[in-house]
């Protein structure tokens, strides 16, 4: 009986230790899950901010391209350059180089 009681006490002690370990591990798991959710939330917020920033910059670039076309057109009209004004109306007018285009035509 004493031997059985000692064995039972030993098993109860092992169960208590296992329960403590289980509680500790669950706590660590919960902390890690909370940290993971926080990181995901921060990353999602960064991505939303980056998308808004990219859209704002895209809009600004479009506006500036329009301004460049307008200013170049005004300069061409002011100088009475029909050839330059026609070149500006083509698609590569903002990004292209009028002089290089003329040199290519000349060659």
Image: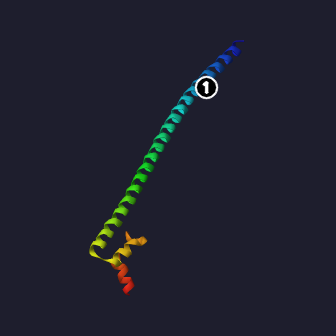
Q: Residue at x 36, y 81 (%)?
A: 102
Report which quarter residue 104 is drawn in.
bottom left
Residue farthest along the left direction in this orientation: 79
Residue 81 appears at what percent x and percent y? 31, 77
Q: What residue is disc 1 on? A: 18
Q: Residue at x 38, y 75 (%)?
A: 87
Q: Relative to the observer, which residue lies in front, 39 or 1?
A: 39
Vertically, is 35 above or below 96? Answer: above
Q: Relative to the observer, which residue lies in front, 8 or 26?
A: 26
Vertically, is 6 above or below 39? Answer: above
Vertically, is 59 above or below 29? Answer: below
Residue farthest along the bottom direction in this orientation: 107
Report which quarter residue 65 is drawn in.
bottom left
Tag 1's secondary structure?
A: helix
Q: Residue at x 34, y 76 (%)?
A: 84
Report which quarter residue 19 is drawn in.
top right
Q: Relative to the observer, which residue lies in front, 27 or 62?
A: 62
Q: Residue at x 55, y 33 (%)?
A: 29
- Would you call the spot at circle 1 few (<14 residues within 10 Å), some (14-19), or many (20 or more)? few
Residue 92 appears at what percent x and percent y? 41, 71
Quadrant in the picture for the N terminus: top right
Left-right relation of 54 to 70: right
Q: Relative to the observer, which residue lies in front, 87 or 13?
A: 87
Residue 58 appears at what percent x and percent y? 41, 56
């Amino acid at each position: 009986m004493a031997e059985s009681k000692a064995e039972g006490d030993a098993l109860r002690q092992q169960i208590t230790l296992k329960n403590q370990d289980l509680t500790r591990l669950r706590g660590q798991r919960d902390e890690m899950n909370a940290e993971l959710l926080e990181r995901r939330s921060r990353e999602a917020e960064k991505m939303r901010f980056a998308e808004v920033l990219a859209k704002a910059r895209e809009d600004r670039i479009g506006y500036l391209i329009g301004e460049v076309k307008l200013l170049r057109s005004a300069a061409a009209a002011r100088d009475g350059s029909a050839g330059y004004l026609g070149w500006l109306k083509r698609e590569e007018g903002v990004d292209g180089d009028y002089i290089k285009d003329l040199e290519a035509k000349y060659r």
